[in-house]
Image (tube, rainbow, N blue to C red):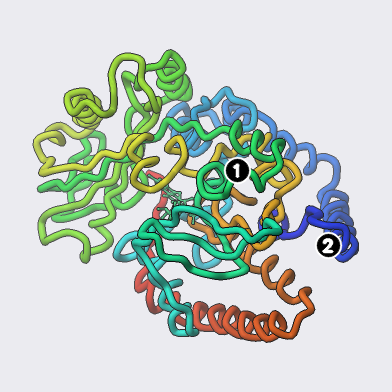
Amino acid sequence: MQMLIQETSQEKASFSDRMRDKSHRSVFWAHCLRRAFDLGQNEMVNFMELLLSPAWKVLNKWFETDVLKATLATDAVIGTTGSVHTPGSGYVLLHHVMGETDGAQGIWSYVEGGMGAVSSAIGNAAREAGAQIVTNAEVSRLMVDEYGRAKGVQLADGSEVHSSIVLSNATPYRTFMELVPADVLPDGFLRSVKYADYSSGSTKINLAVDRLPSFQSCKLSYPHAGPQHRGTIHIGSESMEEIDSACQDAVNGVPSRRPVIEMTIPSVLDKTIAPPGKHVINLFIQYTPYKPSDGSWMDPVYRKSFADRCFSLIDEYCPGFSSSVIDYDMLTPPDLEREIGLTGGNLFHGAMGLDSLFLMRPVKGWSNYRTPVQGLYLCGSGAHPGGGVMGAPGRNAAQIVLQDVKRSSSFEQEDGVIKFENMAQKVSRILGRRTREALGTMYSIEIN
Ligand SMILES: Cc1cc2nc3c(=O)[nH]c(=O)nc-3n(C[C@H](O)[C@H](O)[C@H](O)COP(=O)(O)OP(=O)(O)OC[C@H]3O[C@@H](n4cnc5c(N)ncnc54)[C@H](O)[C@@H]3O)c2cc1C
């Protein structure tokens, strides 16, 4: 998988690019074939089975205990509207467990100060290398010249930023349907972007509580936080059938009656985010349709009743949990769309289905970060290899930009290449050194 994730150039962009990329692609596919041969038929078939099968089948094959299977199955449906029976959910499971922390495979980490610390670390490294970063500046449109090439962006306040290279990590829908002038994009491309799957059934609730939850199944007694508070805590679904029935509610248009809940309590690891004695709890919840048929996420009463349903479910496992809640913030799919620009509320900038991975991400024919607009690149989760805090789409896109800039022949651009490359090398050097310092402490989270 590592090889596929880091691969950048599988597509052609123009005739000359195609010629130049030909040998690279030949090497890549030859490498793929060699790896496939190395795996041998059995391993290869196992790999294909994992990619194509529903998680239900994969997990039933490997495990016996319902509660263990349900715990693992959550990662196969997270961020999707699918169930454990959806073909390809095995890949979603793999996508969520193939990461690593400090070389340890399958371990999730929590970053001190919250996930924003990752962006800050990268931002600080870039600033140190000479980059200028502007935040809280909404882009209202991409500017193109008379040949349809990118020439910069216009901000919502009317100001313009000029550049012949623009990278967008907004969703493909937002980038191409809302920011790029419609008349510069081919119809077929626009249709593919428009009809990609941006659906999502995930809601996030962030809570402040005045005490740690006390799990009735766990008799460990620690004066403060115990190991039961330090991992990912799965609430509600004790079998894959229960996850499936939570999904069926959403298929029928209503939020799950017994939602699938993943709880983490970052404040037991990170003392910087809550005052002494108080805690921060994150709930990742499924399934919540974007437009429920029995009410509206705009209605405060409807919102509260769903949050209360989640808290009552937690009460079943941790009596008294509801009464520990000081306040909370709830982000349903329309909230995620409005506040973070996630089309449809989809965490991954588009579903990670088998029909939208690798050569088909974001759409068929445009998986190499280039776009039909010369100078505009896609560098976020909507591009290969998809969502998650892993940085791979950005890294891959940056490499493509460097290649393209190097290929331009004018003196001005060559000068630009040198500056750009120097800065890229500098950022990467500083990042290696600074990330560990700036990220402070990274904590491993294991499944409870
Ligand atoms: C609730 C939730 C929980 C998650 N949990 C995890 C997790 O535990 N682990 C994990 O690895 N991943 C998690 N993810 C996924 C992860 O956050 C994303 O995959 C990752 O942030 C994607 O990074 P990105 O740079 O591609 O896009 P984003 O982080 O989505 O960044 C895109 C940015 O573009 C901005 N933008 C959009 N339009 C414009 C515009 N017109 N002008 C200016 N800016 C604009 C947006 O505001 C946003 O800041 C979660 C996502 C969500 C929503």
Q: Residue furthest front?
A: 146
Which disc number belongs to residue 86? none
Viewer-nearest residue: 374 or 325: 374
Quick one: SS at disc 1? helix
What count of labels does the image hold?
2
Residue at disc 1, CB closer than 8 Å to ligand 1:
no
Residue 72's spot in the image, x, y percent? 49, 37
Q: Which residue is mark 1?
A: 182
Q: Quadrant of residue 292?
A: top left
Horizontal side of 137 relative to 42 (left or right) equals left
Tag of residue 17: 2
Q: Quadrant of residue 142?
A: bottom right
- Tag 1: amino acid: Ala
Mark 1 neighbour class, 10 Å CA radius: few under 14, some 14 to 19, many 20 or more: few
Q: Is residue 306 left or right of 384 when viewed as pictured? A: left
In the foreground, 272 or 354: 354
Q: Is the residue 247 above or below the residue 422 in the image?
A: above
State the residue at coordinates (64%, 32%): 88
* Residue 236 seen in this snapshot: yes
